[in-house]
Amino acid sequence: MLKIGHRGAKGYEIENTVISFQKAVDMHVDGIELDVHLSSDNEVVVFHDDTVDRLTDGKGLINAFTVPELKRLLINRKEKIPTLREVLELINRKCFINIELKSYGVTETVINLIEEFVKNKNWKYDDFLVSSFDWNALQQVAFLNDKIPIGVLTETNLELALAFAKFIQAKSLHPHFHLLTKENTAQIQSKGLHVFPWTVNEKKDIEKIKSYNVNGIITDFPDRV
Ligand code: G3P
Ligand code: MG
């Protein structure tokens, strides 16, 4: 069963930052999950929200900033928003990267970056897993490069997500953990898909979800899994 650090190790360090990813690696995760947007100068940046307001000392839509402008913003007074390229260089294949596309517009640039790392830096397609709640974005991934592993995210409709995941030949289904039972976990797996629920943090929930024999758990607290 795989241990996947949510936004790095969000339970211990500020989410989606270099220190959070380093912490997750120190906790021997199999993978890290991170969220991406496109900056106004067409770079993939690692950040959860549509706006920088909650986490930084700035204000406004993340898509409206260039990378140099984003680098001037501070998270928690000291951390900076990383680019996806910086995170890939930091991780350097120590674990796989679950890239969650937060907007349709970032898709093609993410694919280009994955292809560059596979072609020039000895990464494998299996070092990546691209997921999204935006199924149009996932369809675009499958259309542009069918070697990239895909994870279908859902927090509402498991049946529909399963049908879609089979349709685009996804690798995995990523349901909110409340949607899962032992039976539907087995049903999804019988269709050849892996099951990676999120965000399972409490020890009792972790034990329950583990008993369903899921393929991995996405958690803020990798050391609890
Ligand atoms: O990828 C799993 C999880 O991260 C999805 O929700 O809002 O935490 O990005 P969110
Ligand atoms: Mg996410």
Image (cartoon, rainbow, N blue to C red):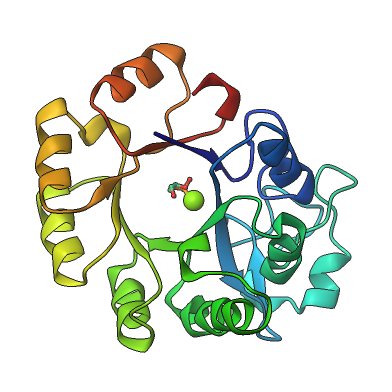
Could you say where residue 199 lies in the image, as x and y percent from the top left?
Answer: 43, 35
Left or right, 92 with respect to 101, comes to right
Could you say where residue 28 lies in the image, as x and y percent from the top left?
Answer: 63, 35
Identity of the residue drawn at 77% across and 50% down: 18
50 above or below 109? above
121 above or below 155? below
Left or right, 1 with respect to 80, comes to left
Could you say where residue 188 lies in the image, as x and y percent from the top left?
Answer: 15, 46
Q: Nearer the viewer, residue 213 or 182?
A: 213
Could you say where residue 24 lies in the image, as x and y percent from the top left?
Answer: 66, 38
209 above or below 107? above
Can residue 100 be spotted in the picture? no
Q: Nearer the viewer, residue 120 or 44?
A: 120
Identity of the residue drawn at 79% across and 43% down: 19
In the picture as drawn, the residue positioned furthest to the front comes out as 122
> How many numbered badges does the structure rendering display?
0
